[in-house]
Amino acid sequence: MAEPTHLDPIRSQKPEIRNPQSEIRNQEELSHFDAGGKAVMVDLGGKEETHRVAVAGGCISMRPETFRLIQEGGTKKGDVLGIARIAGIMAAKRTSELIPLCHPLPLTRIEIRFEMKEETSQIEIESQIETVGRTGVEMEALTAVSVAALTIYDMCKAVDRKMTIESIQLIKKSGGKSGNFLRPQTVSEQ
């Protein structure tokens, strides 16, 4: 029986957006597919161990009343941000169990930070993950932010089901063959 070819049209397309810093690779170079289009785990055997850092961010928006409950510690479930921080740390450590082709990594640092934005009723979430290894920690950083945001939602959904999780993104990374990446700030972020 022939393998499905639903990926072939996607793999043969050239990206329309050209990135001068080469952070977007041609789709023919996707590392998690072999020449036949089958999913594979990347072989790290020939890669050099380097210090690797990734920072990711995102935010959760909510009603002003919900924001005040979190700020004042008034939720019935306890310290929302303290629990979200632990959840983010746990998620970073277990990323390879959640994302099928991620390698399990010995993480050397996991930090989760929150910034309360009272004027917009938002909580900005940032993670910084570090390792000395043969592959990067971008997925661990993104997973940490995602799960921290989901935990805030879970702990406050009884009072606000309209909370919105948004803008989860890689902010910067360093180390490895591909070098450094720094997301340019938009005018609204400056």
Image (cartoon, rainbow, N blue to C red):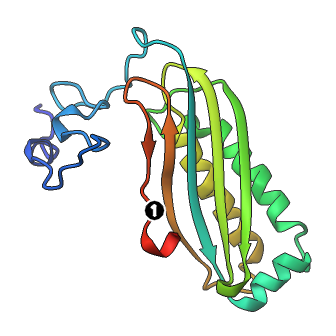
Q: Nearer the viewer, residue 172 or 108?
A: 172
What residue would you read off at disc 1? Answer: 185
Label 1: few (<14), some or many (≥20) within 10 Å?
A: few
Q: Would residue 29 appear left or right of 40 to someone viewing this image? A: left
Q: Secondary structure at mark 1?
A: loop
- Report if residue 98 is visible in the image: no
The residue at 58%/35% (across/down) is: 53
Image x and y of residue 174, in percent: 50, 34
Q: Residue furthest top?
A: 46
* Residue 44 sits in quarter: top left
Q: Would residue 21 appear left or right of 147 to someone viewing this image? A: left
Residue 112 drawn above or below residue 137: below
* Residue 61 sits in quarter: bottom right
Residue 151 drawn above or below residue 44: below
Image x and y of residue 121, in percent: 68, 83
Q: Nearer the viewer, residue 101 or 67?
A: 67
Residue 25 drawn above or below residue 152: above
Q: Would residue 137 appear left or right of 70 to someone viewing this image? A: left
Image quarter of the N terminus: top left
Q: Amino acid at mark 1?
A: Gln
Image x and y of residue 83, in percent: 82, 58
The residue at 29%/42% (across/down) is: 21
The residue at 62%/27% (across/down) is: 131
Q: Would residue 14 appear left or right of 78 to someone viewing this image? A: left
The residue at 50%/46% (across/down) is: 172
Q: Nearer the viewer, residue 53 or 8?
A: 53
Residue 90 drawn above or below residue 130: below
- Report if residue 133 is visible in the image: yes
